[in-house]
Image (cartoon, rainbow, N blue to C red):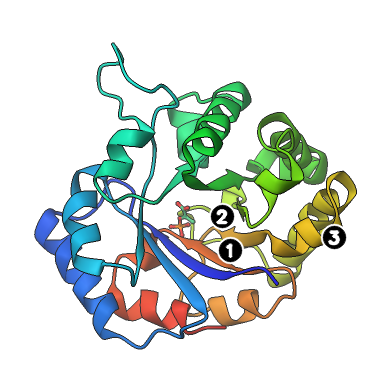
């Protein structure tokens, strides 16, 4: 069975003292033992936060370079973020794709670097509004996965994490309905089954992201193919994030 996961993507939000209070609030709250909780703060806070949360919450980075070292001003390598306590990274968030022009090829390089370094990742995919309106969302998302992720071997895909985040739902307050989410998640799992095996497909956690909050998480997480959520805005307050963690 796929691991249940609730991950908070804090984006470029929170001052350091606010980030500390947020993790303190999460640590103090009730968290079911079968849910993996993850936090993706700005990389600047990774060291302090990972010291604070020990093994209770996985601390990750929102971005990293696939390069090992060298003249890449402003970048940070997997070894560097690992040395600060990051155990996982986001790859392919729609804001990285749209604002920072990251291509499927760039994301493939990050996937390969992560595998080579034993660094876990959440691979994000999802269609923009015009693709949904054109009715071509399934082929669009399948292409994202085929271009950057499905070259991995079955062993490498085992226990992987994919986040389906329709771009039109991110930060808009417009959540996908539970049937829209379930439909895409079921498709993603069927593509993994076709490409690899049902054993691999059942081991991959498929998270929903896009205006998931404490009001709608329960309905989304009740879908058979939704294994949890990647949460933006609603992850910034301990009370709402804790409600989401407890929504299974
Ligand atoms: C995200 O950025 O991954 C996200 C899902 O944001 P929000 O929950 O705010 O839509």
Q: Secondary structure at mark 1?
A: loop
**Mark 3 highlights which residue?**
198
**Mark 1 highlights which residue?**
175
Q: Secondary structure at mark 2?
A: helix
Residue found 32% across the figure and 43% down from its top: 82
Residue found 53% across the figure and 33% down from its top: 116
Q: CA distance from mark 1 to mark 2?
A: 5 Å
Question: x%, y% of residue 101?
Answer: 49, 23
Q: CA distance from mark 3 to mark 2?
A: 29 Å
Quadrant where the N terminus sits is: bottom right
User: Mark 3 or mark 2, which is nearer to you?
Assistant: 3
Which residue extends farthest bottom?
30
First-in-chain label (1 vs 3):
1
Mark 3 closeness class: few <14, some 14–19, many ≥20 residues within 10 Å: some
Q: Is residue 217 above or below residue 120?
A: below
Image side of residue 213 versus residue 53, left or right? right
Contact between marks 1 and 3 (CB within 8 A): the answer is: no
First-in-chain label (1 vs 2):
2
Q: Nearer the viewer, residue 145 or 175?
A: 145
Residue found 70% across the figure and 37% down from its top: 152
* Disc ID at residue 169: 2
Contact between marks 1 and 2 (CB within 8 A): the answer is: yes
Asked if one can make out residue 216 in the rendered structure from this viewpoint, the answer is no
Residue behind label 2 places its C-beta within 8 angstroms of ligand 1: yes
Image side of residue 22 versus residue 116, left or right? left
* Disc ID at residue 165: none
Q: Secondary structure at mark 3?
A: helix
Question: x%, y% of residue 208?
Answer: 60, 61
Which residue extends farthest left?
17
Q: Nearer the viewer, residue 165 or 160?
A: 160
Residue found 24% across the figure and 50% down from its top: 46
First-in-chain label (3 vs 2):
2
């Amino acid at each position: 069975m796929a691991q249940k996961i609730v991950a908070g993507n804090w984006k470029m939000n929170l001052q350091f003292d606010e980030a500390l209070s947020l993790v303190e609030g999460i640590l103090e709250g009730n968290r079911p033992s079968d849910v993996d909780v993850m936090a993706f703060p700005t990389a600047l806070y990774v060291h302090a936060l990972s010291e604070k949360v020990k093994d209770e919450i996985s601390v990750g980075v929102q971005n990293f370079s696939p390069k090992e070292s060298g003249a890449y001003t402003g970048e940070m390598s997997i070894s560097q973020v690992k040395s600060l306590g990051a155990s996982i990274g986001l790859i392919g968030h729609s804001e990285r794709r749209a604002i920072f022009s990251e291509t499927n090829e760039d994301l493939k390089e990050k996937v390969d670097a992560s595998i080579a370094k034993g660094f876990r990742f959440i691979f994000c995919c999802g269609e923009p509004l015009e693709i949904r309106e054109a009715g071509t969302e399934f082929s669009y998302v399948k292409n994202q996965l085929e271009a950057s992720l499905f070259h991995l071997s079955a062993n490498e895909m085992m226990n992987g994490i994919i986040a389906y985040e329709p771009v039109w739902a991110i930060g808009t307050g417009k959540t996908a309905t539970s049937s829209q989410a379930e439909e895409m998640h079921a498709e993603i799992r069927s593509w993994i089954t076709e490409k690899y095996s049902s054993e691999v497909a059942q081991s991959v956690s498929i998270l929903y992201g896009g205006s998931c909050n404490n009001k709608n998480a329960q309905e989304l997480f009740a879908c058979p193919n939704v294994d949890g959520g990647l949460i933006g805005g609603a992850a910034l307050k301990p009370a709402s994030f804790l409600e989401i963690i407890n929504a299974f």
